[in-house]
Amino acid sequence: MRQDICWWCFQGRVEPKRLIAEAKRIGYEGFELVPEPLWDMVREADMRIVTHGGHGTIENGMNDPRNHSRIEDELKANIDKAVKYEIPILICFSGNRRGRPDEEGIENTVACLKRVAPYAEQKGITLALEILNSKVDHRDYQFDRMHWGVRVVELVNSPRVKILYDIYHAQIMEGDIIRTIRTHHDKIAHYHTAGNPGRNEIDDTQELNYPAIMRAIKETGYAGWIGQEFVPKGDPIAALRDAFERCQPRTGS
């Protein structure tokens, strides 16, 4: 398992060149959600860009057919960019519920993903539908429980359509993190971290046991990326160093 950093969490807190240098020194191998003008800077430092937003926006997503043509165009354009910059994952969103029943939202999201999945398969890029909490950060977001996204992935039935399992968001809505990972790991392409409550450091001031979670992820055979997506309250570099150590799984610890 390799670790990366979600850029937006540290933007404005650490100067870009210093962030890249310190991250590399700690042992991180990539960044996510990097502003496009900085892509070359990241690549020149021999760091990977791991994810990019597949389409806009979180609220107006795949569960509404009125968005499908726009999202298809955006995804195909971003797949081409991802190929050029060797970005393995594009993040996708269900959109807000707006009174839409779960089954209707699933049906619409499946239809949207099926329009793009063949192109993603052809180009070797994974589309990862992200679970977000609808209780604190993203009110009314539809994919807020794992069973919803699992059903979408099953129905699309493409090796290039998976789930981004954000541990922070999932903890708020359902908990039961390790059991969920063990049950559905074959449908998960990527993981995000953050401390709960607060979305801050993943230290001992919050409730999630990240060393145990990382051991569980490793035991599934996962060989992908762990994205640190917490907003530091204290020294950002110290927080990144501590997070890296906590997310290095060690057997018997």
Image (cartoon, rainbow, N blue to C red):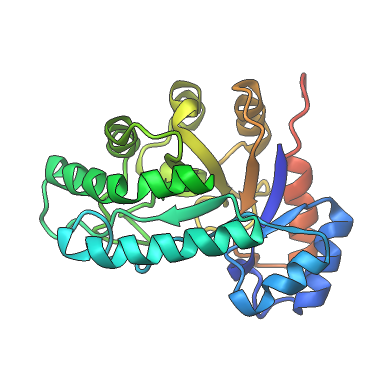
Q: Which quarter shows the N terminus?
A: top right
Q: Percent position (x, y) of residue 236?
A: 74, 66
Q: Residue at x 34, y 35 (%)?
A: 153
Q: Is residue 53 left or right of residue 228?
A: left
Q: From where the camera sits, is residue 1 visible? A: yes
Count of numbered labels shown in the rendering: 0
Q: Which quarter shows the C terminus?
A: top right
- Between 22 and 87, which is closer to the camera in this rendering? 87
Q: Is residue 175 left or right of residue 21?
A: left
Please determine whether, in this image, residue 87 is positioned above or below residue 3: below
Q: Is residue 253 left or right of residue 34?
A: right
In which quarter of the view is residue 118 placed?
Answer: top left
Q: Residue at x 68, y 49 (%)?
A: 203
Please determine whether, in this image, residue 152 is positioned above or below residue 212: below
- Outermost residue on the right side: it is 25
Please determine whether, in this image, residue 200 is positioned above or below residue 214: below
Q: Residue at x 48, y 35 (%)?
A: 188
Q: Percent position (x, y) of residue 223?
A: 67, 32
Q: Percent position (x, y) of residue 112?
A: 26, 51
In which quarter of the view is residue 158 placed?
Answer: top left
Q: From where the camera sits, is residue 200 visible? A: no
Q: Percent position (x, y) of residue 177?
A: 48, 32
Q: Is residue 127 left or right of residue 105?
A: right
